[in-house]
Amino acid sequence: MANGVRLLFGLIMQDMVINQAIMRFKLAGIDNYDATGCYNMDCPGYIRVDGAVIAPGDAIHPVSNVPNGPRQSITLRVLKDKKSGDWWVYYGFNKIPTGVGYFPRSLFSYLAEKADGMQFGAFVKSKKALPTPPMGSGALPNGGKGRAASFTDIRFIDQDGNSRPIKEDLPMFVTDKKCHSITRIDHAVCFYGGPGGCMR
């Protein structure tokens, strides 16, 4: 979301223990790229609803095991409530997403009215002089369904709550296609990921 303010939400791999990473649910409110939020329940302003199935910082288990194991589907949505103006976060694990919390409208200046853009994607980060970690399943997106991670049923929700699949050929930004990459959107689906190993 744009307008000088960003709401970031999604999944992150972290906490390497015995060569295994834990996937966690993350979100943050960012104002002009100066963090006004954080990546767990210490975030000022984020309100978790009673009975929420997940909170920022919670581990997600089980994760997909490709190519031959079970695959999981995680649905994420963020939208503005028409009455309150609050920005709601919805989460679903192999099922229809439910509201898990929200950022009150009062936290924002620009986003109090509307968002003028949105972005989606994946990124990895490593310390200097260390190789980048794998992204997604660790498979490059040319592996396609069954191997690479994917964004599916990518949708835009307008101010009236109407939802439509994104089919446009959107611009892409990839830093090193040998290590991580993404395909173009085709029927509201795109594949992403890679083995990592690039040095920064």
Image: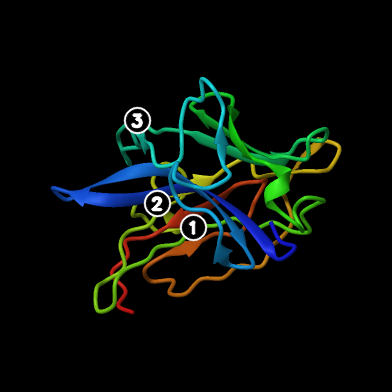
Q: Report whether residue 66 is seen.
A: yes
Q: First in sequence, mark 3 or 2: give its number.
A: 3
Location of residue 96 in the rendering, given as x and y in whole percent from the top left corner? 59, 24
Question: Callout 2: 10 Å neighbours few (<14), some, many (20+)?
Answer: many
Residue annotated with mark 3: 70
Q: First in sequence, mark 3 or 1: give its number.
A: 3
Residue type indicated by callout 1: Ala
Which of the two residues, 75 or 45, is positioned nearer the viewer here?
45
Left or right of 88: which side holds 122?
left
Q: Is residue 189 above or below residue 121?
A: above
Left or right of 36: which side holds 171?
right
Q: First in sequence, mark 2 or 1: give its number.
A: 1
Q: CA distance from mark 3 to mark 1?
A: 22 Å
Residue drawn 64% across and 58% down?
6
Residue annotated with mark 1: 122
Q: Is residue 60 above or below residue 9?
A: above
Query: Label 3's element?
Result: loop
Residue drawn 78% across and 35% down?
84
Which of the two residues, 6 or 48, is positioned nearer the viewer here?
48
Query: Label 1's element?
Result: loop
Q: CA distance from mark 3 to mark 2?
A: 15 Å
Residue 198, numbered label: none
Residue annotated with mark 2: 136
Residue type indicated by callout 2: Gly
Q: Nearer the viewer, mark 3 or mark 1?
A: 1
Q: CA distance from mark 2 to mark 1?
A: 8 Å
- Answer yes or no: do the residues labelled 3 and 2 have beta carbons within 8 Å? no
